[in-house]
Amino acid sequence: MQISHGQSVLKRSQWGWAFYDWANSAFATVVMAGFFPLFFKQYWAASLEATESTFWLGLVNSGASLIIVIVAPFIGALADQLGRKKSFLLIFALLGCVMSGGLSLAAAGAWQMAMLLYLLAVVGFMGANVFYDSMLLMVVDRGGHETDRVSTLGFALGYLGGGILFGLCVLMTQKPQWFLLPDAATAVKLSFFLVGLWWAVFTIPILLYVKEVRSDERPHNPLRSALKQVWGTLKNLKMLRPAAIFLAAYWLYIDGVGTVVRMAIDYGLSIGFDSNDLIIALLITQLIGFPATLLYGRATRYVGIKTGIFIGIAVYSIVTVWGSMMQSVWEFYVLALIIGLVQGGVSALSRSLFTRLIPKNQAGELFGFYNMVGKSATVIGPVMMGWIGVLTGSPRLAILSLLVLFIAGSLVLIRVQVPPEQE
């Protein structure tokens, strides 16, 4: 089966792969960026001081990221050795689905239980992405504009799917009586359950339609072979110099991107904006992200993939400077719209560029490193903002500090040499 997509024809396997982004972006939007930070402070940890709840919230996010930093290269290599990327994706996705749904059972004041469930859900989300990203090379020929189209399609569907469910969940919290719910708190709990269900149902297409070719030669000891593969990659990283340089650049600029996503609501609250306004702004980002990501991917045919990433980084730099000076909530809305125009494109093109720089038979392991780099960045970015905020007493200077990451990332990205046939 083939489905028309503009001037190209996308295969059923490519749509099946891309729909996993539709599935798991519901968690990223509704839980990670939206309801969990607010509900943690106002419901589960309401008895704690604001600074203490912020500490625990930051700790659980960093802890989940740190777990993936440690295990991602190994589990990616193990999946390569066994030829079981789909099986590993399913295990981690189910962990995320079940734990996300489990958040609906955590009672008021049970902040320790909520933290544990959230930790495991985030590990499931991030862990599954190791295999999802590497499976891109299972549905496209390495490199070329087809890779860009399919990668951006995934992110675009993620924005659309996450935005649709997030919009429904926001409506439930604003008008719980329309859904026969007693109050907004019940609506938020139902939202956590719906995320788990949504994620599980829309994981089915990638399992059905993406075919995994397995080698007849299996290692006698897959665990030892996986460890040797990771160690060999680390020793021979000089031979993959373009990929290594790109990972350094990616670590810097995606640190800024991830920190903006994770800390936007917290920053808005700290300068006095209402939580309802911030949720609406986040919804704007999601909805504009769907068409914008598709158009962003198409535009790179004319300017090149690296230039496309540079444009996104420049936009984030402008947003950072403007955000540090904004005074009115309408400015927050405008910045949310601008971020929606480039956020998906930068992430999709980064993933696509990385596929151009790595051997296909090491995709699982190397995307383990790719995810390790991305997730370690989201550990450091929020800490840097917090540190600057404490030292200066100004959340505005804290957000402005992210400009350093975007500039440094651009300077390193300049050095990445893309093979001419892969442009």
Image (cartoon, rainbow, N blue to C red):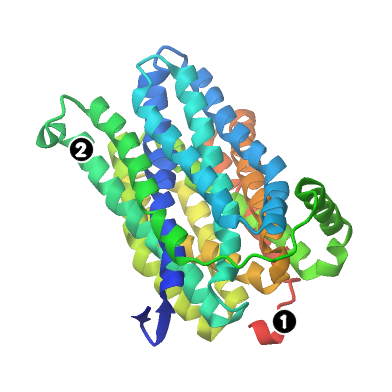
Residue 219 x %, y %:
78, 56
Task: Describe residue 297's horizontal placement relative to residue 200 as left or right.
Answer: right
Furthest-top residue in view?
Answer: 47
Pointer 2 local density, CA inside 10 Å: few below 14, some 14–19, many at least 20: many
Q: How many marks?
A: 2
Q: Distance of mark 1 from mark 2, alpha carbons?
A: 50 Å
Q: Amino acid at mark 2?
A: Met
Residue 140 x %, y %:
55, 75
Residue with the mark numbered 2: 172
Q: What's the mark number on residue 419?
A: 1
**At x 52% / y 53%, what residue is drawn?**
321
Q: Earlier in the sequence, mark 1 or mark 2?
A: 2
Q: Amino acid at mark 1?
A: Pro
**Can residue 107 be seen from the camera position used here?**
yes
- In the image, residue 303 sits, relative to residue 113, either above or below, namely below
Residue 95 x %, y %:
49, 38
**At x 39% / y 47%, what residue is drawn?**
199
Pointer 1 local density, CA inside 10 Å: few below 14, some 14–19, many at least 20: few
